[in-house]
Image (cartoon, rainbow, N blue to C red):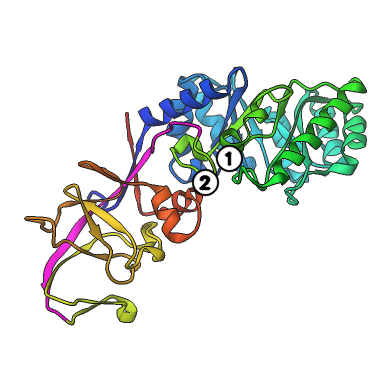
Amino acid sequence: MKRRVRVEIDVGALVRNYGKIAAHVQPAQVLCVLKANAYGLGVGAYARALAGAGCRMFGVAEPFEAMELAGVLAECGRSADASIQILSSVLPDEIPDMVAAGIVLPVAGREEARAISDAAVRIGRKARVHFKIDTGMGRLGIVEDEALAVVREACALPGLDCEGIFTHCPMAYDPRDPFTAGQIARFKALVAAAAAQGLAFKYVHMAASDAINNFPECARAPFNVVRAGINLHGSFDPNGRRALAVEPVLALKTRVAQVRTLKAGSTLGYGRTWCLREATKIATISAGYADGLPLALANRAQVLIKGVRCPVVGRVSMDYTTVDVSRVPDVAAGDEVVCLGRSGGEIVTPDDWAAVKGTHAYDIICSLGSRVERVVKY
């Protein structure tokens, strides 16, 4: 049986987006962030396509993701020339396996540096590390005031290849906020101070998708790597610039379950939040919040049926959603419904849903349900 709800991933669009990002930031390299199973869309298809397009640097959040990605890259013959970096944190018991597997590890403090060094010496191999500096995110990393001393001490430890240094921006989605400019200046000063003490790094990076669009200096020296996440999917934060002409990668589709004409005065859904002023043709579609349709779409958004925008009327349920199909001729059970994506000359994007929900596209993409079939289109 085919699933009623599916998300289609356009690999061609993904590869084109990667190419546009790479061209925009050159000569900096693009590190493609594929954490959380490529934001729930399937790390295998993403990694194979991006590796085939020339990507050699990948980022994940934690060790399980790193090993899963390593398996994919090995299958497609890219394990020897590609690096996988854990961008967040590594726990003490995880370190030996990660060092043995050749995963690039974050150093977020003295203790981590020593533990990684000890594991590398025991195993008899170098551990590649990037220093994770907290310049204002307040989440993980070496606090800025201690960074130079910690970096200097760690670089003297055996078994470490201290190849990189990086930080992360909490406000880069807003090009008008002054915090990011100050953060950039402070991080550049730290890198320069380290260099003055003979501590140079092969990789220096700060920009994720927001900074790529809003702070182009983060792709210029001393920076030589950018971390692309949401832009790979063709989405942006709603507050910033859109310097990249990327395109949506995914389409979320379902089918019509039933079509009825309901009389004036009928109410729709839990809470009876919509009352029909006149007799109206209503379609119930086979997708709800369990599939990733936000509750916030109720009475505020549209889906596409036969190229026509059909308003969502009534509350979104777990498995079904009701829409007004008065403008769609001959609509019937089984017809395709485009919740996200293009139909005819119309398009609905994750950014559109994010605006309705008051969030960002990451939230929309990561919320697609586990029963939604992932279909890769080449």
Verify CB contact (< 8 Å) between mark 2 and mark 1: yes
- State the extent of the magenta-drawn residues as a range: 243-264
Q: Residue at x 78, y 43 (%)?
A: 135
Instruction: Identify the amino acid type marked 1.
Output: Asp
Residue matched to label 1: 210
Residue matched to label 2: 237
| Picture quadrant of residue 300 | bottom left
| Picture quadrant of residue 217 | top right
* Left or right, 17 with reference to 184: left
Q: Residue at x 34, y 80 (%)?
A: 271
* Left or right, 367 with reference to 317: right
**Residue 347 vertical position relative to residue 69 in the rendered view, above or below:** below
Q: Is residue 248 magenta?
A: yes
* Left or right, 306 with reference to 82: left
304, 67: nearer the viewer: 304
**Residue 324 vertical position relative to residue 58 in the rendered view, above or below:** below
Residue at the farthest left position: 330
